[in-house]
Amino acid sequence: DRATGEGRLLGYDLGSGKMSPVNDFAATPGELHELQLLGDGLLMVASTGLLGKRGTQPLKGPQVENSALYFIDPRSGLLLKKAAVEDKDQILAHFAVAPDGTIVAISGQRPDGKDAGGAIYVMRKGESSLRRVPLPAELAGAIQGEILSVAIDAGRSLASVTNPNGKL
């Protein structure tokens, strides 16, 4: 919502052919980025933690909380779980979920942050927090700006990421 800066979720009934919302609720105090419907019916939403108000560019508003993944019941709008990153300089944007429930989330540094590049986080099924993956120095130094997408090859236990501004 560009007027209030809060992240809102709207649900539409695609079967009716009408694009009027069937639900509309505030999901997070900051901007939303990606969302995915999980196998258990919950929505997982990446929140930037930034207040995106009218007149500010996306990812440039004031910080209201650390970036986080929110797990929301789409029927009631209730927040059931939140997994925030500890590093306030990182903005979560995209994620992927492996068949075993492992979540790989990727980020970019805040424009005014001290980190030079993005980060990769993992949360295994049953865990309650995101863990930053330590990267070798040469790889960490090559990542610049936002890591834009992630894909998981479950057969090889491999996650691949893109970083258009980096030197990978």
Image (cartoon, helix red, strand yellow):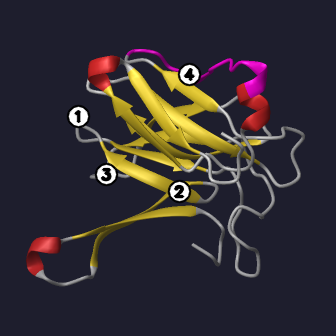
Residue identifier under label 1: 40
Judge from the rendering whether residue 14 lies leftward or rightward of residue 141; answer left or right: left
Describe the element under mark 4 as helix, strand or loop.
loop
- What's the CA distance linking mark 4 and mark 1? 19 Å
Between 156 and 18, which is closer to the camera in this rendering? Answer: 156
Considering only order in the chain, which callout, 2 or 1, is on the residue closer to the N terminus? 2
Judge from the rendering whether residue 158 lies leftward or rightward of residue 133; answer left or right: left
Marks 1,3: beta carbons within 8 A = no
**Which quadrant of the rendered structure holds the C terminus?**
top right
Describe the element under mark 1 as helix, strand or loop.
loop
- What's the CA distance linking mark 1 and mark 3? 11 Å
Considering only order in the chain, which callout, 4 or 2, is on the residue closer to the N terminus? 2
- What's the CA distance linking mark 3 and mark 4? 21 Å
Which span is picked out in magenta? 126-138
Compared with residue 125, is residue 117 higher up or lower down, i.e. above or below? below
Compared with residue 36, is residue 8 higher up or lower down, i.e. above or below? below
Name the amino acid, label 3: Pro
In the picture, the disc for residue 74 is: 3
Between label 1 and label 3, give the one nearer the viewer: 1
Between 32 and 4, which is closer to the camera in this rendering? Answer: 32
Name the amino acid, label 1: Asp
Between 25 and 98, which is closer to the camera in this rendering? Answer: 98
Judge from the rendering whether residue 38 lies leftward or rightward of residue 105; answer left or right: left
Residue identifier under label 2: 33
Image-quadrant location for residue 38: top left
Kindly identify the residue that appears in the image at 75 percent across and 36 percent down: 142
Image-quadrant location for residue 29: bottom right
Residue identifier under label 4: 129
Describe the element under mark 3 as helix, strand or loop.
loop
Kindly identify the residue that appears in the image at 79 percent across and 50 percent down: 110
